[in-house]
Image (cartoon, coloured by chain):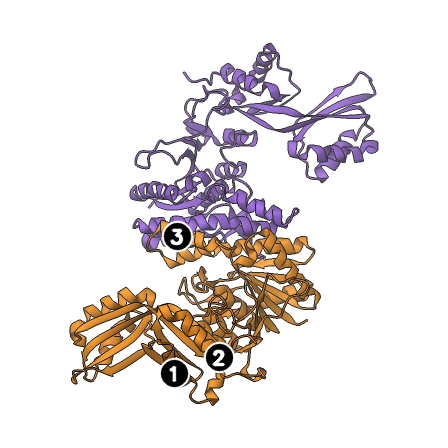
Chain colours: A orange, B purple
Amino acid sequence: MPRLVMKFGGTSVANVERIRNVARHVRREVEAGYDVAVVVSAMAGKTNELVAWCKEAAPIYDPKEYDVVVASGEQVTSGLLALVLQNDGLPARSWQGWQIPIRTSDQHGAARIASIDGSGILDGFEARREVAVVSGFQGVHAETSRIATLGRGGSDTSAVALAAALGAERCDIYTDVDGVYTTDPRIVPKARRLDRVAFEEMLEMASLGAKVLQVRSVELAMLYRVPTYVRSSFDDPADPKPGTLICDEEDIVEQSVVTGIAFSKDEAQITLRRVADKPGVAAAIFGPLADQNVNVDMIIQVVSDDEATTDITFTVPAADYERSRAILEENRERIGLKDIQGATDVVKVSAIGVGMRSHAGVASRAFRALAEKGINIRAITTSEIKFSVLIDAAYTELAVRTLHSLYGLDKA
Amino acid sequence: MPRLVMKFGGTSVANVERIRNVARHVRREVEAGYDVAVVVSAMAGKTNELVAWCKEAAPIYDPKEYDVVVASGEQVTSGLLALVLQNDGLPARSWQGWQIPIRTSDQHGAARIASIDGSGILDGFEARREVAVVSGFQGVHAETSRIATLGRGGSDTSAVALAAALGAERCDIYTDVDGVYTTDPRIVPKARRLDRVAFEEMLEMASLGAKVLQVRSVELAMLYRVPTYVRSSFDDPADPKPGTLICDEEDIVEQSVVTGIAFSKDEAQITLRRVADKPGVAAAIFGPLADQNVNVDMIIQVVSDDEATTDITFTVPAADYERSRAILEENRERIGLKDIQGATDVVKVSAIGVGMRSHAGVASRAFRALAEKGINIRAITTSEIKFSVLIDAAYTELAVRTLHSLYGLDKA
């Protein structure tokens, strides 16, 4: 029998009635001839409640105990879905991370999957076509036998990793949207659902602000070449739409230059004025930030009015903004800087498409179009298949719409 | 260091604020020089919520999946208490049943503890006086690695079994009452808190309707001679009262004839009229009931008016009443019975005391006292250290108060 991994997020399992709907999707695939493993998240709102209790218990909490508390949410859902499936006459059983086991690193709260032993689940497939209902988001650290969670959105990663371990034909990620769009439809009503996206594009889109999948899950899908669908759990279980397939670039026939426009408000800009322009200054600035695990993204250096000094602008995650300024203040003398300026009301807008590899001048068209709208670009970064611009947050919608139209992504 | 097991029930851990109070009790014992293992229940109301979801998911549910769902409640509490203790500066970690492991039978939903490996917890004691926060109510079936729960009140059993496994000096069961009473104070305001109760007495009291401890926990306390206190979590953590000690009979200096009066409304009476009085009839009646796991309790047989037949009265748990009648109807011909009568508005009132062993006529005084109040006795059973009478439920309070006074249990 071919194998299939299906994953359902929190809104899809928010209560027993919704879980019954999930069971209908599962039954359809079982009847279509698949051996099915279903990965489930905690019921909507549960994880937030559990996290709030942890914070109330200890403002600075031990991530090992945090993991014990929050992993309970998925445990509840997995048991309930197994009960519903059994009640519908399908053989089913729940699997917790430690039972499979899904072995992880010991970075509690943001653990990485090290290995998955699929043998127990495969035995259930062979013996009685038993549906495996797997708690997402969790695994176990092999040496300590402690529960470890994968970070927010980790159930996507559980699903893709399990699909790879089981040799599944594909992995279906059911969400509350019906696929991946050219950009956020709440910002651009003309946004189109994509039939197919290349792994590399999806990875950039997820990294650059599209919230549809956890970045790590796309990395794994790409690494293990797992065809992955993003589709809606709210479709009629008897006649669902296919959603968006994330697949190899070669499997996409009609490739446009730009596939999607992503944006992220989770950025802050820091500018250092009149830094001494001498060797080693970059290390003096970015070394201490790296030591404190601050992820510096866009970096621009321009010569200032004063010839002996330079201005340096870069971005950091908004959550690390205050901390980053404090680190720089501590190192002010070593860096030899005069002035620190910053802004948190900025947004990074990105255009992504594997077609950029073979087309020149894609980004420069954007710079011109944005300039014509009076939008000032504060920073630019480019890579082989994407470019990003940092602009004032007030221009987010205008910039996204402008680029969406510019690259022909608007609905016909 | 001497070792101590403390157990806190659902109302004692109902929210993070109450859990903080639990941590104060734990700190007191750690500072008094104990290495401490704390067994916790689910937050009050949680188990009911989880059970309701299971029933909604599947009216007839697989107990293996039920166990997965309900065991999550204790997991949450154990993680939260560990966080609170750490936040207060005490080394602490949570332990789930499968991590210790607490190995159980495979009777999911009502599993029995088979063995406990205390070595991990003891390592934590030795290495850093680490408080072990243990999820009560749960264990793991060794062969299948599936989560198994111990039935309602099972955390008491977890605590006593753990105390035995760790060689603890004693086991403190913290509840919302401050000890074991001579009877239910809601029925008899003059009920007294007992300083000490013998294991055997506590076992009878728990079996006969006193809800303070799970029967199995008392069996284990008796078997392993674990001195067990029942005490209040609502006492001032800085100056708590000792509660009631459950201990060896020999450790109780002032032994009264009757220690307590228990009652159970969870009874139903069945009377079979004019059963053929021939050999094998008892087997014909009670065999089919035993085969269907109905626990028959009090049995009385009296010769009826007709000399060739007999009337047989017995009790079954109220929950099994309808089912028992149906089983008897099915076997009506084999039994050769004419008429089945029954009553569910009955109550079993019991007097318990190890002193009965050495005192004659204890029960007969009760029969006289009840008769004087006009209370009709429907059935009687006696054993070495208790007797029980089955009466109309309407007389419950009157009968309990009468016996409570009769045996000198009223407060001075």
3 or 2: tag closer to the N-terminus: 3
Does residue B234 appear left or right of residue B374 in this picture?
Answer: left
Q: CA distance from mark 3 to mark 1?
A: 49 Å
Given the image, what chain letter belongs to the residue carrying mark 3? A
Q: For the residue labelled by badge 3, is the local secondary structure a helix, a strand or a loop? A: helix
| Quadrant in the rendering for residue A322 | bottom left
Q: Spatial distance from mark 1 to mark 2, Cα to Cα?
A: 26 Å
Examine the rendered structure and indicate whether residue B30 appears above or below residue A385. above
* Mark found first going from the N terminus, 3 or 1: 3
Please identify the quadrant where the C terminus of chain A is shown: bottom right
- The residue at which mark 1 appears reads as A368
Q: Amino acid at mark 3?
A: Cys
**Front: mark 3 or 2:** 2
Q: Quadrant of the N terminus of chain A?
A: bottom right
At x 81%, y 27%, the residue is: B337
Label 1 or label 2, whichever lies nearer to me, is 1
| Residue under pointer 3 | A54
In percent of width and height, residue A55 lies at 37, 52
Against B412, residue A193 (above or below) is below
Numbered disc 1: secondary structure: helix
Q: CA distance from mark 3 to mark 2?
A: 37 Å
Graded by Cα atoms within 10 Å as few (under 14), some (14 to 19) or many (20 or more), the crowding at tag 1 reads few
Contact between labelled residues 2 and 3, with CB atoms less than 8 Å apart = no
Q: Amino acid at mark 1?
A: Arg
Residue under mark 1: which chain is it in?
A
Would residue A330 be found to the left or right of residue A318 on screen? left
Residue that carries the numbered disc 2 in the rendered image: A200
- In front: label 3 or label 1: 1
